[in-house]
Image (cartoon, grey):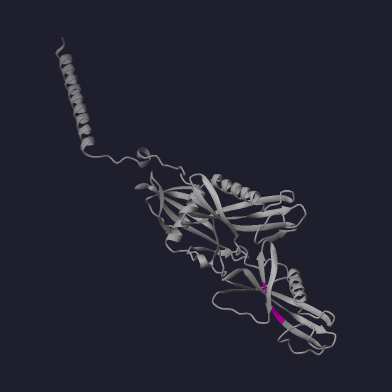
Amino acid sequence: MDVKKYNKLKLKVFILTILVIGLVAYIVYDKKLYTYLPIKKDNKENKEIDKSVNINLNEITILVKDYFYEKNMVKEDNLVRWNITSSEYLGYYNDNQNLKYYQVQGTISCKDQTSSCVSVSLDDTKDKKETFFFETYVMVNENEENKNVESINQVLNENEKLVKINKSVPDDTKDKEKIKKLIKNYYSINNLTNSDNLNTWDIETVQYVKKQNELTYYELSGNFSCKDNTSGCIIFDQIDTLTNNVYSFDIIVEVKEKSDLFTIMSIKSNIYHNKSATIKKEELISLLKDYTKTSNLVNESNLASWDIVTVTYMGYNKETENNKIYNLKGVYSCNDKTETCLTLKRPGVKRSDNSYPYSIYMEVQYENNKAVVISISEDILTDNNFVSFNETIN
């Protein structure tokens, strides 16, 4: 064999042997290094992002309202309506996936026409009925056993640990439909509806209000119409006219819940749902004139003219919440040019045309879809229980 070729072969074998030994040593070293030095893995590979929404709007509503009542953040004696209308699942905290963050939106209205009845952050806008729009941010601990509100913030708490999801919270209508059916059955069984005269009856909203002792309170609102174009086909303590021959209602329902059995304990009108006086000016004028006739407060044979110029809704007293007080002003004149044809303690100063100005306060009670005059007076008595509005009625 050629000596030169043999030496080259030996060199190649030697180099190849060194390379193999080096490769084996590197593999062994790398495995040991991996064992003792933990390598940070990408969170996306380690942990799959959970985008599921495991709560519905009705659950959010109950959790939030119960929390507010528990923390004395609701002035119930001033509250008219508090509706939670939507919610968004913002995300969860990376170090604890049970902590879920939600944005909650809705509306509130208070008896004193301010926004003081619920401690929430308000939007700058409000509607004509003094309904304020709000949003708040809720942290819910959703563990396997139950769901609890951990905290409520008025502003968004940006946190780098928050894994953002931004999904709308669904509205589960199953319980709401159950309440609607319960109400309609209750009205039918207790003869509170005239099915032969009833044209339409839509319950548009069902809103959880609160729990108290063993009872749950719901607010229901909607509209109805009767075939004879009156409001007599369903009995509500108070209604409003929406359009011609269509009427709206707003009621508070007291329900006893046991497992899947719901029992209605009482129903009453949410008499503050529209704080403006919805009765028309002409109706109030007729109420006053009819009352003075039946009470012998007017001498029609001597009455020459009686004009009621302005009608103002003054407000109500908290102790008699179904009663509303109105002020009616105008002028009247008598055939004998005196002031005696209308019984008043203090008529105004006689004018050059022999007419007299007057101002009368009339208390009207609303019950069973009817407005009834309770009393009239030339004075209005107000105290700390009186809620004032001073709204002109056209």
Q: Nearer the viewer, residue 68 or 54?
A: 68
> Can residue 36 be found in the magenta stretch?
no
Q: Position of residue 151 (x, y in %)?
A: 40, 57
Q: Quadrant of residue 26?
A: top left
Q: Nearer the viewer, residue 341 or 116?
A: 341
Question: Which secondary structure class fits the magenta region best?
Answer: strand
Q: Position of residue 330 (x, y in %)?
A: 75, 80
| Residue lying at the far top of the rendered structure | 1
Number of numbered labels in the structure image: 0
Q: Nearer the viewer, residue 393 or 2?
A: 393
Q: Residue at x 48, y 53 (%)?
A: 62
Q: Position of residue 197 (x, y in %)?
A: 74, 51
Quadrant of the drawing holding the N terminus? top left
- Horizontal side of residue 228 vs 66, given as left or right: right
| Start-end of magenta stretch | 359-363
Residue 379 higher or lower than 56, as above or below: below
Q: Residue at x 38, y 52 (%)?
A: 160
Task: Tell me if residue 239 can be seen.
Answer: yes
Task: Tell me if residue 85 can be seen.
Answer: no
Q: Residue at x 79, y 82 (%)?
A: 332
Q: Quadrant of residue 364?
A: bottom right
Q: Position of residue 93 (x, y in %)?
A: 38, 49
Q: Residue at x 53, y 67 (%)?
A: 78
Quadrant of the drawing holding the C terminus? bottom right
- Horizontal side of residue 260 vs 352, given as left or right: left
Residue 336 higher or lower than 25, as above or below: below
